[in-house]
Amino acid sequence: MTFEYSHAFAQQLDDADPLRSFRNEFFFPAHEGKDVLYFTGNSLGLQPKGTRESVLSELEDWAKWGVEGHFHARRPWYSYHEILTETSAAIVGAKPSEVVVMNQLTVNLHLLLISFYRPEGKRKKILFEYKPFPSDHYAFESQARLHNFLPNEVLVEMQPRDSEWNLRTEDIVAKIHELGDELACVCFGGVNYFTGQYFDLSAITQASHQVGATCGFDLAHAAGNVPVKLHDWGVDFACWCSYKYLNSGPGGVAGAFVHERHHHNRELVRLAGWWGHNKETRFQMAPGFDPIPSAEAWQLSNAPILSMAAHKVALDLFKGAGIEALREKSEKLTSFLEFVIHEVSKLSDVQMEIITPTDPSARGCQLSIVVPGYDRSIVRKLAKNGIIVDWREPNVIRMAPVPLYNSYTDIISFGKIFQTIL
Ligand SMILES: *Cc1c(COP(=O)(O)O)cnc(C)c1O
């Protein structure tokens, strides 16, 4: 579709947007009495208006019931995590038995690597993407040490071609085949946090399995942003956080996926806790771990209910909007932002470069923009004008127009202000 660089045009798109009412479900921070233009839902999603009520109701039940709330709360805490499973599974394209909501993201990454990074003989390497999120890198380093390797013996960071930012699928697949029987595990971000590139998870999984390696993904920037099909693609494991696109609050409870083909493998090594034990016999409190034959076997501890109460509200909004409808709007909204950046480039004579792939199927809603000749102070200037974006060294602005609560008007307003700042 052809776009126009005007408020009237953006307003038309908003009027025709079937998801426009979801914006009213969220609180926006204010700037000089008006809602900010919020483009950092990839970092911390906004608070749904229903969150307070949901958390308060658990506080009330705790006050009313004490320990008996485990079974008598309106939503009994004993099984609370189970009511989050179905919507979470839909978001990552999994069967409900393959998904569990628990812990935090990096914790889950470690728990899954314990099971799925099992170096043996010469098969000991981990392949991951160029510029992974630092926490993932630290996780890989420490997993290497856990197996008595030096990180540089086993860690392989996939490099892009000269003067390219993004990784080509054919190069990733070739690298996997090159490493062959030295490769124990492939673990990429689903969408890279820096460039916004959405990798071809299906091709990566298939190639990994061809050489006998396990394959998993950190979906921090993918869950709630792009449609994934973990089950159909045969992915071994995945994890994600809930506070970015999933709007479940700072440090919110995270998610994990384990493909069903691993559920009955009692030989799998894992760190176990009582919440992963057979529910029928859990309260016999006897030694001898009997894993639940589902992703729930990876649970260690009883559930953080207050955090889950926030997560529930946010997941219900996703369910209401529908993953497909969100993706459809997301592609259009992001293309509109791309168009606006190019217009601002032309009008301001600052040749900005978008390093995120131009192909909509190779990105989510984030665009990463290099603004030549500017430093971090540009982000502060934008903030003074009520625009929230983020900055990543050395020179990249990251912006995510998220389909649940951003509008086309947000984008045009950003463009007009940005143009005057440049
Ligand atoms: C946001 C993010 C993290 C953060 O990890 P936490 O354990 O939630 O603090 C880790 N990895 C990736 C890829 C991320 O995008």
Image: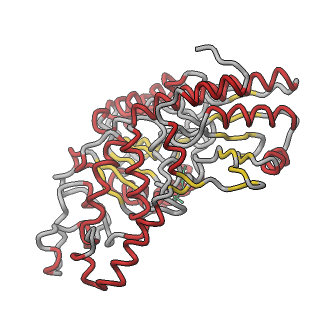
* Way the structure is coloured: secondary structure
What residue is at 36 percent from the left and 44 percent from the top?
Answer: 319
Q: Quadrant of residue 78?
A: bottom left
Numbered disc total: 0
Looking at the image, residue 300 sits to the left or right of residue 25; the answer is left
Where does the image place residue 286, in percent across and percent down from the top left?
Answer: 15, 80
Looking at the image, residue 399 sits to the left or right of residue 114; the answer is right
The C terminus: image quadrant: top right
Looking at the image, residue 102 sits to the left or right of residue 296; the answer is right
Classify 218 as above or below 178: below
Where does the image place residue 68, in percent across and percent down from the top left?
Answer: 24, 82
Camera-side residue of 418 and 81:
418
Classify 230 as above or below 277: above
What residue is at 19 percent from the left and 63 percent from the top?
Answer: 291
Looking at the image, residue 342 sits to the left or right of residue 190; the answer is right
Classify 415 as above or below 377: above
The N terminus: image quadrant: top right
Classify 362 as above or below 379: above
Residue 147 visible in the current orientation? no
What residue is at 58 percent from the left and 49 percent from the top?
Answer: 133
Residue 73 visible in the current orientation? yes
Where does the image place residue 372, in percent across and percent down from the top left?
Answer: 84, 33
Q: Farthest residue toward the top? A: 2
What residue is at 44 percent from the left and 44 percent from the top?
Answer: 223
